[in-house]
Image (cartoon, grey):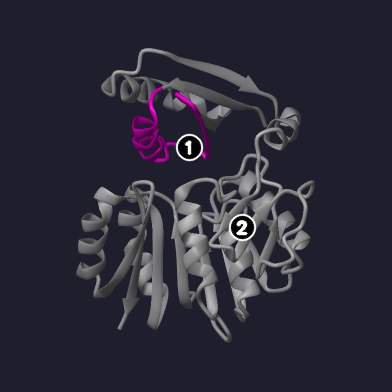
Amino acid sequence: MNYIELNILCNDELAEILIAELACYPFDSFATEPDTLKAYIPQEKMADYYDRVEALLAHYGIQERRYIVIEAQNWNALWESNFPPVEVDDVVAIRAPFHDPYPTFRFDIVITPKMSFGTGHHATTYLMSRATASRDFTGKRVLDMGCGTGVLAIIAAMCNAESVDAVDIDEWAYENCTENCQVNGVEEKVSVYLGDVSTIRGKRYDTILANINRNILLADMPHYTEALNPGGELIMSGILEGDIQAIRMRAEELGLTFVGCDLKDGWSAVVTRKE
């Protein structure tokens, strides 16, 4: 599968806003460089969303952008050249196979991201990794919804979860998460599924991790609430700091209790509980 790399000339503040906006479309990974945002979308889907993306860019006054075809076989070389290791609070290391190990960290996670979102470089994955690593999941069933590379599912499994379901609508993510779980030795605990929120119908979890985007979270929160056991936590990110109130209001409408939030670089992770 070929991808389109959309290069957008913009400042860092606008890049964060555009990531949130473009995540509502089938863009499944992003990278930032000085004055440039790179957004990746399957080539076969670009035609269906081109007009909407162009209208969005026009709305934000974007004058300079470029669409580049990235062949699938070239992606590994691309990310290898731009993938530094990530350190989360001296506890979680997220690195590629060619990086040196982190023996002093509690979690030393090896990821081959390919086209999947979730290397830890984005603030939302950082926040969710921090939240996941701080919990003891002994005897608990965990859901990683919108799993991407599977980083959160892997951390949950390493935190003694009884079982973890990892779900993503993207085939790249499904294949990549499966591979990464094997590399990190948690494949017996993590079940990976290709699908949307309907995949979890009839299932129950003690903790649900959802790092997606504001609109999907608001739409799918009733399904998460239904799947959450009493006393369980729903931890969400993929949302800007300014979206916290909307997420909190929706959660409280569904009977969830707002526990708190964590912030990084204008992004947030929200913790709620089903009493």
Residue 132: x and y in percent read: 51, 68
Nearest to the eye among marks 2 and 1: give it: 2
Q: Is residue 26 magenta?
A: yes
Q: Residues within 10 Å of mark 2 (few under 14, many from 20)?
A: many
Q: Residue at the top extreme?
A: 63
Residue 3: x and y in percent read: 61, 28
Q: Which residue is mark 1?
A: 26
| Residue depicted at x 51% and y 23% | 6
Span highlighted in magenta in the image: 10-37
Q: Is residue 201 something one can see in this rendering?
A: no
Q: Earlier in the sequence, mark 2 or mark 1?
A: 1
Q: Quadrant of the N terminus?
A: top right
What amino acid is at disc 1? Pro
Q: Nearer the viewer, residue 21 or 89?
A: 89
What amino acid is at disc 2? Gly
Is residue 140 positioned above or below 25 on the image? below
In this rendering, position of residue 238 left or right of residue 85: left
Residue 206: x and y in percent read: 47, 79
Is residue 32 positioned above or below 212 on the image? above
| Residue depicted at x 60% and y 44% | 116
Q: Quadrant of the C terminus?
A: bottom left
Q: Which residue is mark 2?
A: 150
Secondary structure of the residue carrying tag 1 is loop
